[in-house]
Image (tube, grey):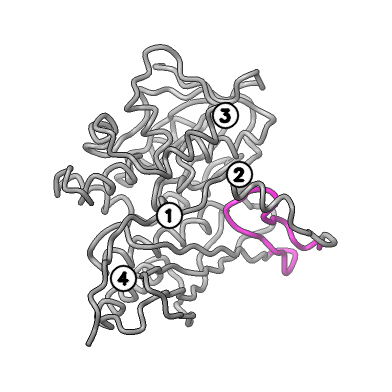
Amino acid sequence: MEQPILFCTGGGCTAKLGAGILSRILERLPKGPRDPRLLVGYDSKDDGAVYQLTEDIAIVQTVDFFPPMVDDPYTFGKIAATNALSDIYAMGGTVCTALNLVCFPQDGDLNVLGEVLRGGAEQVTAAGGSLVGGHSIADHEVKYGLSVTGIVHPQKIYPNNAGQVGDHLILTKALGTGLVCSAARVGETTQEALQQAVDSMTTLNKGAAEVLRGYTVHACTDVTGFGLLGHLHEMMDGNRSCELWAERIPALPDALRCAGEFLYTAAAQRNRNHLTPFVTFEAGIPFEMEELLFDPQTSGGLLVAVPPEEGEPLVAALRALGLPTAHIGEIVPKMNQEITVKER
């Protein structure tokens, strides 16, 4: 007899290990001799690895998978695939191939698994890639994601840590997926708010990435499990500081209310604990905004640093795609505090 699956118990990028734990482990791993063709590795905290094949072609490799954060298997498959594909775009690449990564109960309902895989396959196709196989193992919990390979010109890679003083910080999607999904699991938000979060999580960063190719991108990352502040901390790389303007931060409907009702995740608190030494909230910044900035995002938007003269045109071009893009801050010379959050 098939056993029922407890499908959504709290997943997405809220299931990721904390940044502090990962840093302590990764810094102890033996690195071996550096291959000159390895242009980007895990030591740079970038979104994907980049390996040069020819003078004009490098491959981008990434992998991402997690448990469900919504109850519908098809929707979960779309979200997980969108999230995994995003790292290719964050590196400036184009999606080529993808492999499924599946954990599923041995005696589970295979119709559920089929819906998960259907959702993922549709997003790979929408990204212009080919689904070429995968790997599955029996597990008592459902997990799904992709290993993705893309290509990029070696001279057109987007690093996550090469922003320059004066750069405008542009965010392409609204924040709050962790808050809204957490509230939805306990029946404390509306179906409309959840649907808008799902719409955001299933929106590929492909369109935004195509627009970016017409601009000077000094640094780029996608905003996922470490929250906006965590990924911004990686972007500053200990060499720069930045100001964020709270009134400019785009939030998903009901996300701030959920934060005010303490409907946040354990992952958000891990982000807060890790990042507190690097962040100052000026007087007047409400608690709800703090939580929004620490909130782990699943399939979040791109965070981009561009020269100041290109910031406004880029925002306009991205908004023309229907994205809730905003100029949310600027990079400033290195100060005692790395990230300062102001009203404006």
Element at label 3: loop
Element at label 4: helix
Task: Say whether marks 2 and 1 touch (CB < 8 Å).
Answer: no
Residue that mark 3 sits on: 167
Instruction: Please tell me whether mark 2 or mark 1 is closer to you in this view.
Output: 1
As shown in the figure, which amino acid type bears the numbered disc 2? Asn
Q: Nearer the viewer, residue 152 or 299?
A: 299
Q: Earlier in the sequence, mark 3 or mark 4?
A: 4
Give the image location of residue 110, x and y in percent: 28, 83
Work out how far the residue at label 4 is from the one at label 1, CA to CA, in angstroms: 20 Å
Q: Residues within 10 Å of mark 2 (few under 14, many from 20)?
A: many
Magenta stretch contains residue 239? no
Q: Earlier in the sequence, mark 1 or mark 3?
A: 1
As shown in the figure, which amino acid type bears the numbered disc 3? Asp
Direction top: furthest residue: 283
Q: Quadrant of the N terminus?
A: bottom left
As shown in the figure, which amino acid type bears the numbered disc 1? Ala
Residue that mark 4 sits on: 119
Residue that mark 1 sits on: 15
Residue drawn where x is 14% and y is 45% of the image: 190
Which stretch did the figure color magenta? 35-56
Task: Say whether marks 2 and 4 touch (CB < 8 Å).
Answer: no
Work out how far the residue at label 2 is from the one at label 4, CA to CA, in angstroms: 29 Å
Q: Nearer the viewer, residue 56 or 305?
A: 305
Q: Residues within 10 Å of mark 4 (few under 14, many from 20)?
A: many
Work out how far the residue at label 3 is from the one at label 4, CA to CA, in angstroms: 37 Å
Magenta stretch contains residue 47? yes
Residue that mark 2 sits on: 160
Instruction: Please tell me whether mark 4 or mark 1 is closer to you in this view.
Output: 1
> To which quarter of the image does residue 61 belong?
bottom right
Task: Say whether marks 3 and 4 touch (CB < 8 Å).
Answer: no
Give the image location of residue 274, x and y in percent: 54, 36
